[in-house]
């Protein structure tokens, strides 16, 4: 058990790195997912096709494969994901001055994969708005954009928030894979490192890592449960 | 589905013209973008050469049949692990859901007919069991599947229990997915109108009989699409077998890459394989859902409360939970 | 349905046992095709394996020249050939070997748990590992080295990482990864870890890392495949004697393997195994390393 105390800084470091990845990936996935969702319900057929194809491709592929394409496909395209190096973000990427692209690759993979689910969560919210609302808006002469902005979206986000929450929880858990694709020092890789390279006993390390993930996922899940119960009452 | 057409008017001639033009422009832009950003850099690096693609797509290549034989083995292993995992998850998940429902109804009983110490004992036991199952559900739902599989593969031998890697993978996947399935079924049962179980009680069924004969069958029916979608999740999650050296599609892919040095090509093939199978499964889920909702209308079954959105999306949205 | 399957499995198992027993009898008469019949001290591991006519061996599946599972679905390489020499000496036919993948980080575990009977997997002998298992051999002595791009002149050895700017790649849980940690300034930004060396090589080729470090023979395998792109950065900076891992207390089996290795040194089968596999990459074999009977 002493490993939990002796190596507390290692666990804390892993937790911190995982948290950073998750927060950044969540923001990215929400933005990209919203864009894809708009594409999927837009009036222009090719855009709709693009949105649908995007969701079908990324939802049906194992994340491992997406990660691989991000970490090895992007370099083959001649990119080190430098387009992500915008001021502010850059400070997080360039920890201590050296630039490792794998953090960015992992981020891209998580965003691309999660966005497909975000899109579906948002769409399920839109579908939950009674059709009469949109029809009434249309008969008032609102355009597609106005319809979304003033009538549908303000009502749909409430229905989307719980599914979105579970998407984010899933993403936190999925982030455990980044350790296998060149990101050094996240929570799951910490487990590997401590048990196999440094020879610590397995059970205490397992407990420490589990606590790390549960700290992130369980409270979020509980929050969602509460929101859901309140919404059920409101309905 | 129908929502899309509800959001905008049926376009008139002018609108149709604009749509057509913008469609064409969008298509052209996409194609041009794909050409310059994807095709050209790859072509410059020789990623389209037949040296790299040949073994995968050219039947006359000397390695073609070997490569596909290996991929076939891998995919068979993937399917086997997925099938075993989903079966055991269904069994364990159903039992867990029944147990939790049972405990919940027991928790309301006061066991007044029994001697005081016995009744206190029973109530304590009920409370303890429901606390334990609750904690199990929360913990295993909150842990990444990779970690669960890794823990199983490292932890079991620690206590002197060893299996083939297949079983570590199946156990790891079962632990996670049975908990998710249990929650799907439980919420399905709790979503049923209260009259169902009241009627069952009125005709003299015991609580567990009510669960088994009245609630569970209906919950299965409502949740069938979600359950099928969970299959997609399991299938995708078997790809995590690579971390414990189980020879599924991705591990085999890695071996092929080691021999032929064509990582991008092999991964493209594997991705297509997964997308095709999983897409078919999702379509099946949609079809089942349509059949069921049609059947429900004609059969005149009472309208159920919709199952909680979180759980539905957890399962159907690619089971996010595991969704790797 | 389920019962039927269980019954079928049971039937198959009985059948297999029966067949195995038959095979055993056959070779016992000295006419078997699997080689001459052997006799070993009663109760020893050798006797048990010989009686069972089956052995499980842990090796790498992704190490060119040492243990790589290619398109044939069978592992090939120097480790594999050395293991085959030992198996032959045990009087077990080659096709009765079950190969189990043993990546760097699980090698001790599979021996301790009894998942495999021995491990031959570019397995460096060191004292920390000797606490849990025992080593026969060494049968080869490698050394850690660094692979860089052909036109790289900035990296000359492990000390080139001390200033904190160069990035180096290795494999999770391996000795080279631990060793290079002593030489880099900041692990978090300079060290990249993957599960296979293939990925490290691709990362080096793509320019995401500046160097790949591991045992020289592994690097030579990659250089042999792509001489236009890669080279070694300098001399070996560690000694990595490869041994055969067995259970910690199994001294008889260890001595048996050591005897077998010495025999293979003198009858030329050791050199032949090398020439057929890793020797093709241009690494030098040198003189046979003296086995260490501790």
Image (cartoon, coloured by chain):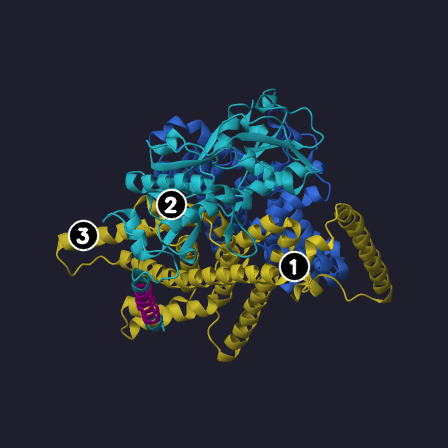
Drawn side of residue C10 relative to residue C180, left or right:
left
Residue nearest the viewer, comparing C37 with C149: C37
Residue A114 visible (yes or no): no
Q: What stretch is highlighted in magenta?
A: C6-23
Q: Do the residues labelled 3 and 1 touch (CB within 8 Å)?
A: no
What is chain B's hue in the picture?
yellow
> In which quadrant of the rendered view does residue B27 lie?
bottom right
Residue A34: image location, x then y, percent: 66, 50
Q: Which chain is cyan?
A: C
Separation of marks 2 and 3 at Cα, in angstroms: 53 Å
Which residue: 30% across, 73% down?
A: B202
Please state which of residues C223 and B218 is positioned toward the viewer in this rendering: C223
The prevailing secondary structure element of the residues shown in magenta is helix
**Residue linked to disc 1:** B56
- The chain assigned the colour blue in the figure is A
Is disc 1 on the same chain as disc 3? yes
Whether callout 2 and callout 1 share a subunit is answered no
Q: Earlier in the sequence, mark 3 or mark 1?
A: 1
Up the image or down, C106 lies above or below A2; here it is below
Is residue C18 a member of the stretch shown in magenta?
yes
Between marks 2 and 3 in the image, the one whose residue lies nearer the viewer: 2
Residue C64, how many percent across, how many down?
56, 44
Q: Name the residue under label 2.
A: C118
Residue under numbered circle 3: B121
Q: Residue at x 69, y 56 (%)?
A: B53
């Amino acid at each position: 058990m002493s490993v939990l105390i002796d190596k507390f800084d290692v666990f804390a470091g892993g937790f911190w790195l995982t948290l950073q990845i998750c927060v950044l990936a969540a923001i990215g996935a929400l933005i990209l997912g919203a864009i894809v969702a708009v594409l999927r319900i837009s009036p222009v057929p090719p855009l709709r096709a693009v949105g649908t194809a995007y969701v079908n491709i990324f939802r049906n592929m194992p994340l491992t494969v997406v990660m691989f394409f991000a970490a090895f496909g992007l370099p083959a395209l001649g990119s080190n994901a430098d387009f992500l190096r915008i001021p502010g973000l850059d400070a997080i990427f360039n920890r201590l001055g050296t630039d490792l692209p794998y953090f960015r690759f992992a981020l891209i993979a998580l965003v691309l994969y999660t966005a497909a689910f975000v899109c579906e969560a948002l769409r399920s919210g839109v579908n939950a708005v009674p059709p009469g609302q949109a029809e009434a808006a249309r008969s008032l002469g609102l355009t597609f954009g106005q319809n979304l902005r003033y009538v549908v979206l303000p009502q749909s986000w409430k229905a989307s928030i719980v599914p979105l929450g579970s998407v984010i929880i899933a993403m936190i858990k999925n982030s455990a894979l980044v350790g296998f694709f060149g990101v050094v020092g996240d929570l799951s890789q910490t487990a590997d490192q401590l048990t196999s390279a440094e020879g610590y006993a397995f059970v205490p390390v397992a407990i420490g890592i589990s606590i790390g993930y549960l700290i992130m996922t369980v409270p979020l899940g509980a929050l969602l449960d509460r929101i859901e119960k309140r919404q059920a009452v409101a309905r | 589905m129908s929502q899309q057409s509800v959001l905008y008017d049926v376009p008139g001639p002018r609108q149709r013209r604009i749509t057509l033009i913008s469609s064409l422009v969008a298509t052209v832009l996409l194609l041009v973008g794909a050409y310059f950003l994807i095709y050209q850099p790859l072509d410059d690096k020789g990623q389209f050469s037949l040296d790299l693609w040949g073994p995968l797509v050219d039947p006359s290549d000397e390695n073609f049949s070997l490569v596909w034989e290996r991929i076939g083995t891998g995919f068979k292993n993937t399917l086997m692990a997925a099938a075993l995992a989903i079966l055991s998850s269904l069994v364990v998940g159903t039992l867990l859901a029944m147990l939790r429902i049972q405990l919940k109804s027991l928790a309301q009983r006061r066991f007044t007919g029994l001697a005081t110490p016995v009744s206190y004992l029973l109530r304590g036991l009920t409370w303890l069991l429901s606390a334990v199952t609750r904690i199990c559900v929360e913990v295993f739902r909150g842990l990444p599947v990779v970690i669960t599989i890794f823990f199983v593969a490292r932890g079991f031998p620690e206590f002197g229990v060893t299996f083939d890697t297949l079983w570590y993978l199946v156990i790891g996947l079962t632990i996670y997915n049975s908990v998710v399935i249990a929650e799907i079924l439980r919420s399905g049962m709790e979503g049923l109108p209260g009259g169902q179980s009241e009627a069952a009680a009125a005709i003299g069924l015991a609580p567990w009989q009510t669960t088994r004969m009245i609630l569970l069958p209906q919950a299965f029916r409502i949740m069938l699409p979600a359950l099928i979608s969970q299959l997609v999740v399991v299938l995708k999650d078997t790809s995590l077998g690579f971390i414990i050296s189980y020879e599924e599609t991705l591990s085999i892919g890695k071996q092929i890459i080691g021999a032929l040095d064509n990582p991008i090509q092999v991964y493209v093939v594997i991705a297509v394989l997964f997308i095709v199978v999983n897409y078919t499964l999702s379509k099946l889920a949609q079809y089942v859902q349509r059949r069921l909702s049609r059947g429900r209308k004609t059969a005149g079954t009472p309208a159920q409360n919709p199952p909680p959105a979180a759980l539905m999306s957890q399962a159907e949205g690619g089971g996010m939970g595991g969704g790797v | 349905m389920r019962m039927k399957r269980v019954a079928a499995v049971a039937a198959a198992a009985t059948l297999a046992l029966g067949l195995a027993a038959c095979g055993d009898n056959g070779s016992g008469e000295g006419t078997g095709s699997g080689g001459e019949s052997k006799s070993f001290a009663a109760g020893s591991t050798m006797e048990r394996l010989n009686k069972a006519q089956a052995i499980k061996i842990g090796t790498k599946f992704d190490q060119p020249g040492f243990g790589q599972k290619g398109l044939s679905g069978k592992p090939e390489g120097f480790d594999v050939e050395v293991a085959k020499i030992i198996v032959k000496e045990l009087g077990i036919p080659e096709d009765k070997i079950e190969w189990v993948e043993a990546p760097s980080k699980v090698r001790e575990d599979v021996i301790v748990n009894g998942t495999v009977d021995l491990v031959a997997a570019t397995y460096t002998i060191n004292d920390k590992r000797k606490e849990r298992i025992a080593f026969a051999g060494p049968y080869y002595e490698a050394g850690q080295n660094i692979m860089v791009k052909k036109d790289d002149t900035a990296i000359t050895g492990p000390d080139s990482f001390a200033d904190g700017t160069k990035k180096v790649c290795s494999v999770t849980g391996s000795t080279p990864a631990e060793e290079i940690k002593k030489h880099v300034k900041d692990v978090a930004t300079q060290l990249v870890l993957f599960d296979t060396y293939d990925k490290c090589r691709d990362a080096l080729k793509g320019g995401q890392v500046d160097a790949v470090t591991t045992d020289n023979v592994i690097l030579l395998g990659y250089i042999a495949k792509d001489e236009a792109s890669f080279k070694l950065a300098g001399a070996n900076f560690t000694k990595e004697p490869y041994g055969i891992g067995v259970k910690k207390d199994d001294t008889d089996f260890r001595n048996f393997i050591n005897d077998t290795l010495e025999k293979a040194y003198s009858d030329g089968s050791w050199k032949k195994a090398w020439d057929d596999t890793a020797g093709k990459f241009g690494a030098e074999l040198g003189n046979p390393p003296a086995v260490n009977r501790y």
